[in-house]
Image (cartoon, helix red, strand yellow):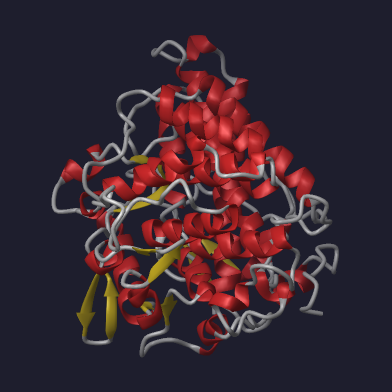
Amino acid sequence: MKTNIYIYIGLFSLAVTCLSSCQLIGDLDDETIEFSLDAETAITDEDSANLALAGAYAGLTSQGNGSIDHYAAIPSSLAGGVQQGIFANLEEATYAINNPQKTDTQSNRNSYATLYQVINKANWIIEKVEELSDADFEVPGRRTEIIAEAKGIRATAHFYLLRLWGQFYDINSAYGITVRTSPVRSADVFPRNTVAETYAAIIADLDAVIASAPDFRQRYYVNKTFGKGLKARVLLYQGDYAGAAALARDVIDNSPSNFSLSTTYASIFDSTSDALYNNTDIIFGSRIDASAGASTSFFYTWQFNYNITPKSAALAAESTTIGSQKILHDSNRIASQQSPGYYGINNLKWENNNTTINHLRISELYLILAEASARASGTVTTEALDALNSIRIRAGATTTGGDGFETYPTTITYAEFLEAVRIEKYIELFGELGEEWFDMVRYDYADGFGSGFQVSDIKEAATDPNKFILPIDELNIQASNNIVIQNPGYN
């Protein structure tokens, strides 16, 4: 059965004429690329460059099997925050028990290919726009901005690939991903890069974003603040805590007025009007073209296949004891984004907010600062505690020191604080892009797999660190003639 890959760029569509080694899910004859246009001649001036860039942005919201609803849903399923509904298939069931399968996959294989398609679009834009001159652009500086935005898209896709299919938590691991920084012109196969090499490529692109992307156009376009914020997250994943704290602090203190904590949590996910795209909490969020059917894809995937689990729903009502004080996690944020549905507890972040995907919010930068500042110094710094409590206060916490929804006190220990950050981040970001799962893995690795904090403390089925990342589908391995090697534990 042929796979139809639809590439939407408004009235203009750009497609590549061949697939990368990481997209090889069968013979090239089995792929049908509709609405294709020769990429080598497509980008000739400012208008065509902007249209091609729109296509790269659209790739981050591509619909159907392998779309962002899958590579967002899979890590949340691994974490146990969402669960399969009545339309779940065998592949999705393996994520719930933390034993992903390596054959006969669809969401896994196609998500992997989708992200490489996004990278390839970005690579064509970068190469062809670099061949043009500033004189080909009416808007001063626009040529440089387009290249920077494309590099931001490429960095995002590489990062999503690394944290799902690579040992992202170990900077010394050989199991990174195949980094692509030039457009595909043949079916040549390239081996995987190391994790360090993968991170270096991502950071190089983000540095270009920080240097040359627009300060702000709209929230659904890459901007300088996104470059800083995503780099802070990348540095946190790498274990460069001082660097992550410095960048997170820079974003919080020095960003344009367009970026600040939203006054209310629920408004971040209210898609009843275009006010959604003016919410200051969103640093970069992909705007979904509902006319392309993408929002329908998100709604059905999450409502029918990935409902909020009772365990996740109950987290808001749980508490942590600091000294003699009982501090409630939160009685509102998770509860405000769930509703009883015919097939389970619906995730309103996707049902009500099916017109945007938040790749980065400024709320997360406060939580990155909290964790990174504490880990960098090995103690609960004033900066770290203030950053954590800023998110609590925005959510309605008081500072009375009683037993209830309170801010965390200065008496909190280092170990208690790190766990408080993890829980707070779970409550704030649950069910968006799987950050709760990647935090669980990072915390486990930081303590040494099998000691200290363990993923299995939260998700009982998650006992094998090899299964903390996904396998590369065997069809991809075979198509590469085994040049692309499989992840450990899946051989």
Residue 222 rendering spot, x and y as whole percentages? 44, 34
Residue 484 rendering spot, x and y as whole percentages? 80, 63
**Who is closer to the viewer here, 309 or 456?**
456
Query: Residue placed at 22% from the left, 54% from the top?
Result: 266
Quadrant of the image containing the C terminus: bottom right
Quadrant of the image containing the N terminus: bottom right
Query: Residue placed at 36% from the left, 72% from the top?
Result: 318
Horizontally, is 237 left or right of 317 in the view? right
Query: Residue placed at 66% from the left, 40% from the top?
Result: 376
Horizontally, is 339 left or right of 444 in the view? left
Residue 351 rendering spot, x and y as whole percentages? 25, 67
Q: Is residue 204 above or below residue 343?
A: above
Residue 251 appearing in the image:
yes
Query: Residue placed at 48% from the left, 69% from the top?
Result: 76
Which image quarter: residue 27?
A: bottom right
Residue 39 appearing in the image:
no
Which image quarter: residue 308?
A: bottom left
How many numbered marks does the figure carry?
0
Which image quarter: residue 125?
A: top right
Horizontally, is 56 left or right of 176 in the view? left
Q: Is residue 169 above or below residue 256?
A: below
Q: Is residue 308 above or below residue 325?
A: below
Residue 447 rendering spot, x and y as whole percentages? 71, 61
**Who is closer to the viewer here, 434 or 19?**
434
